[in-house]
Amino acid sequence: MQNQLEEKFHAAMLAIYDKALDLKKPYRATRFKQMVLEQGGKAAADKLLASTKPSDGFTELFMCGGKEALKLSVEYLVLQSPWNQLFTPEQLKIARKRLMDVGIAPPENVD
């Protein structure tokens, strides 16, 4: 990991995995966690955002906790400050579109 912000983002990616376990119907995103541990949080997010469609995990997260659970998605996380600094405008556009396509308002960018 190149810098402190990326290290903190890595920890935030692992934290959304842990929080998904606390949903009413727990979501165990084992492939997601493995990808983050093997590639690092930033590289894992880059890979997920490069896909032409949302990951199966995005759908599973919704199935386990409805729209509110999508606040635990990579798409929601990358739009938040300070993490949004790590991503390109195109990546942020993809994340925003995926959320809006299912009726989720993107997070406010607060520092």
Image: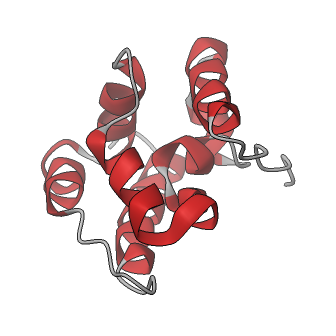
Residue drawn at (45%, 82%) of the image: 23
| Display coloring | secondary structure
| Spot occupied by residue 28 in the image (x, y as percentages of width and height) | 23, 71
| Spot occupied by residue 49 in the image (x, y as percentages of width and height) | 42, 26
In the rendered image, the vertical position of residue 17 relative to residue 35, given as above or below: below
Q: Is residue 92 left or right of residue 111?
A: left
- 12 and 108: which is toward the camera: 108
Residue drawn at (49%, 53%) of the image: 73
Name which quarter of the figure residue 60 lies in. Answer: bottom left
Q: Quadrant of the N terminus?
A: top left
In the rendered image, the vertical position of residue 110 relative to residue 23, given as above or below: above
Q: Is residue 95 left or right of residue 32?
A: right
Q: Quadrant of the C terminus?
A: bottom right
| Spot occupied by residue 26 in the image (x, y as percentages of width and height) | 33, 81
Disc count in the image? 0
| Spot occupied by residue 19 in the image (x, y as percentages of width and height) | 45, 78
- 84 and 61: which is toward the camera: 61
Residue drawn at (15%, 63%) of the image: 30
Q: Is residue 85 left or right of residue 20?
A: right
In the rendered image, the vertical position of residue 43 relative to residue 105, given as above or below: above
In the rendered image, the vertical position of residue 67 relative to residue 23, given as above or below: above
Residue drawn at (47%, 57%) of the image: 62
